[in-house]
Image (tube, coloured by chain):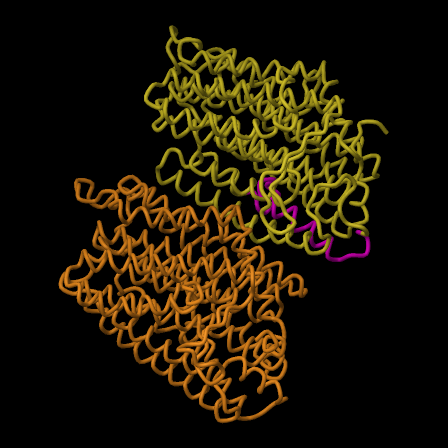
Amino acid sequence: MNIWSALEPSQLINLSIIVPVIGAALLVFAGKRPNLRETVSIATAVILFTLVLGIADNTFNQVPMATTWVVLLSGLNIAFSVEPLGVLFALVASFLWIITTIYAIGYMRGHHEQNQTRFFCCFALAISTVMAICFSANLLTLFIFYELLTLSTYPLVTHAGNEEAKRGGRVYLGILLTTSIAFLLFAVLGTWVSAQTLEFTPGGVFNDVSSSGLIAVLLVLFCYGIGKAALMPFHRWLPAAMVAPTPVSALLHAVAVVKAGVFSILKIAIYIFGIDNLSEIATTDLMLYIGAATVLLSSFVATTKDNLKARLAYSTVSQLSYIVVGALLASSIAAAGATLHIVTHAFGKITLFFCAGAIMVATHKKNISEMVGLGHKMPLTMIAFAIGALSIIGLPPMAGTWSKWYLLVGALEQDKLIIVAVLTLSSLLNVAYLLPIPIKAFFTPAEPNQQPESWTETQHTPLPSLIAIAVTASACLLLFFFPQPIIDLINLIPGVSTEF
Amino acid sequence: MFAQHFPVLPIVLPLIGAPVCMLLARSQLAWLFATLISGFSFFISIVLLLTTLDQGVLSYALGGWEPPWGIEMRVDVANALVLSVVTGLSTLVLVYAKQSIDKEIDRNQHTLFYTAHLLCLAGLSGILSTGDAFNLFVFLEISSLATYTLVSLASDRRALTAAFRYLVMGTIGATFILIGVGMMYMKTGTLNMLDLAARIAEYDSNRTLNTGLAFILIGVSIKLALFPLHMWLPPAYTHAPSAVSAFLAGTATKVAVYVMVRFIFTIYGAEYVFHEMGMDVILLVLAIVAIFNCSFVATVQSNVKTMLAYSSVAQIGYMILGISLVTSAGLMAGLLHIFNHALMKGALFMAVGAVLFRTGSADIKAYYGLGKRMPLTMAAFTIAGLSIIGVPLTAGFVSKWYLVTAALEQQHWLIAFLILTGSLLAIVYIGRVLEVAYFKEPADPTDTTIKEAPVLMLIPMWILVLANIYFGIDTSLSVSAADAASKWLFQPAADLGAVR
């Protein structure tokens, strides 16, 4: 798997962060020629994925990889080191970048979007910061690139440049910057002053967590400071950001940005607090129930939304809190479920977003009520939508089954029956707000005023977009039957295990 | 042989240069001459900074009269650091001024501008280098009188009232300082700072000395625009020529902060000021009110220059806050912010000046659609603005980090939280400008006269912008200098005497 074995292993980290930046620079020069520009985009994405594969290969072989960039402040570095959780997230993000790039080429051209070069450029920069977040060796590095991710995605959110985009962008930047500066930076500084280190350490950095009220406060600050995890009441930015072009929504708001949030929470739970210590912290239960409330409430909100992207956005808010709940259950198996949910939800949700975008490009429909009978016209898209929906719900034979399974087992193991009830109820709500869409699309006859007879799906949906949808939908299926490599990787994370 | 005179050169060069500038009747010639003088002073300051970092203090007896009878120039790390900031910024502003003042100052007054600028520089350098309390007052008056002239030079008639207001307030401040110095002299019979320190240390508490200190602190607070004595500053900075605002915002008030540090730490001693007189609480409260009040006022200003002026008052609050923590770490954070703030405010005022140069207005309406028309200027504004907010990898973040850590080390959790939330207001006032620049359409799209600023304005602006990023990543120089300076200031005054 490792075509980069000739390189020094630690160099792979540097390359995986720098390659997208170089790609972005090349994109600027290739801006005048769309075909060349798109080739550069895809080539960069593929190179990045092979790099991450190389890193994953080294991780399985227990090759340590670490690098320090600069000494930023006394005793604090911008430093990177590889650990399995980060590798997993990097694999997902870099793989889906390839697919999204392919999809975006079709979408952006089909939708005649302006400023496509700026779009692909910011896209590449955002991925670079995601890689840096994946491999960050300490909280300071994580914080820095967390902020850069917010800034580099802001031009993507406001891409349309109209009043609505501006408003969405204001909410996006407002909430994410506010929470990160007021809470996250505060928590990082608090950790630094009380633990004298910010290094991610297996088992956590605090000596004694049970007696300290300070650490209890820090946990709350971390959970809310990472606004990208969209824990209520700081979730408003996510629906607001849906004004972005669909590929942005798909990659950044179903995969990169929101997952960077829950990834950070998982990483902090595992490497700053330590999964085993979490149960001793006074505020863990409080945050756990806030997470559970977010799961339910946003599912309810999702059922009321007629705009497809808005419904998916609230669905994302809900699913993210699954991961927060999994991290805070203080059980190794629930943490494994949460980690796995990063992967399975990514594939499921990106499929749904891709479908929403394909429908918009082909028929200019945004609302669910207009999609009745659309299955007859766009069968491929709607089948993919059904697959994605089933995976989000967590029904076999879709990948989502496994993550929800481990989460439930973890909740049962901790005797948190309320959480079990919440997870079950939420799955039912998922059924209620997702499944009617493909069902009505297929089993209701098309309305007469819809597209004419001669209208076909392949003619009006860009081919690259259809290919992308097919890949992610089949991945949802494949990951159900072959989850083993991912589970092996998860079991390498210290303190996290799919075994009892 | 020549090098031994270095401590006095940053004063003597501009002081002699100023009348020469007056004689060079041509604007171009005066510009070149003033820039060279300032640049050479900068070079010497850097040499001084490196020497003091290496060897400690440099003492220079003016005219060969040995201290404490003669006037002593005394350069240590603290003033060498501020001296480098002042001379460096002066040089960049002079380069920038050549074209900037074309629009803002009457043609036949250009030589007067350069003369006054050099006099101001001489005064500021004098305040920084002198080791004599009365001499400090003299230099303070030289710089202040030159500053009033600089402000009133603007062709906008409102500058005259602003300058007059500044003159009245500044003179009250200077008089207070003189009264205070007089009282100290009355009690101790000396004006040399080290002698003063040694003799004041003999008193536990003395009414004359207390009154003297009160006069001095209030006088200096007017000069440094500490809330609520700041009302002269916003009109002065608003109506002054942009080059003057850029220079003053980064230097004049910062030198006054230095004066306060000198009087508190070197002459009276932290013990006396903070424990005997309880000044720390007063300063702390005023600093926090300054941060919040003035940041808030900044968010509602329609004139961007006024907005930046209020932001400056708020930033001074951060410096005073650092001082009021009464720890070496807090003082270090305050000194570091003097350095970093000069970088960001200088760049911001230069960007605003460039806009003024092209559009003839500093009103926020002039910024509509400027993102496309003046991309480099607005990019500079954006990056410097991010630095004010305190986004990672900018100089502003480094200041904020050390300030919050200093507060947390003293267990001042509330203060730390207030510092962070205070910076959220900066997001609002910087964000307002960026939003109209990048999202609004220009008021008159056909107007082709509005284009990118001239190169000679862009170069110094971007040097400062890049310095913001450089000192946000490689902090070794700025932090070690500020650290050494604060340690130096914090040792008891008696030890300082032993050095001589």
**Chain identifier matching the orange colour in the rendered picture:** B
Q: Name chain A's colour.
A: yellow
Q: Is residue B216 above or below residue B418?
A: below
Quadrant of the drawing holding the N terminus of chain B: bottom left
* In this picture, residue B15 sits left or right of residue B389: left
**Of A10 and A338, which appears nearest the observer?**
A10
**Of B311 and A462, which appears nearest the observer?**
B311
* In this picture, residue A119 sits left or right of residue A487: left
The residue depicted at 24 percent of the width and 56 percent of the height is B32
Residue B176 in the image, given as x and y percentages of width and height: 41, 85
State the extent of the magenta-drawn residues as a range. Answer: A209-235
Quadrant of the drawing holding the C terminus of chain B: bottom right
Residue A345 in the image, given as x and y percentages of width and height: 63, 27
**Of A152 and B187, which appears nearest the observer?**
B187
Does residue B103 appear in the picture of this structure? no
Q: Is residue A220 magenta?
A: yes
> Which of the 4 image quadrants contains residue B210?
bottom right
Q: Is residue A496 above or below residue B454?
A: above
* In this picture, residue B238 sits left or right of residue A38: left
Q: Is residue A124 above or below residue B489?
A: above
Q: Return the residue found at the far right.
A: A500
Residue B389 in the image, given as x and y percentages of width and height: 47, 53
**Of B291 and A199, which appears nearest the observer?**
A199
> Which of the 4 image quadrants contains residue A137?
top right
Does residue A38 appear in the picture of this structure? yes
Q: Is residue A221 magenta?
A: yes
Residue A246 in the image, given as x and y percentages of width and height: 46, 27
Q: Is residue B76 above or below residue B358?
A: below
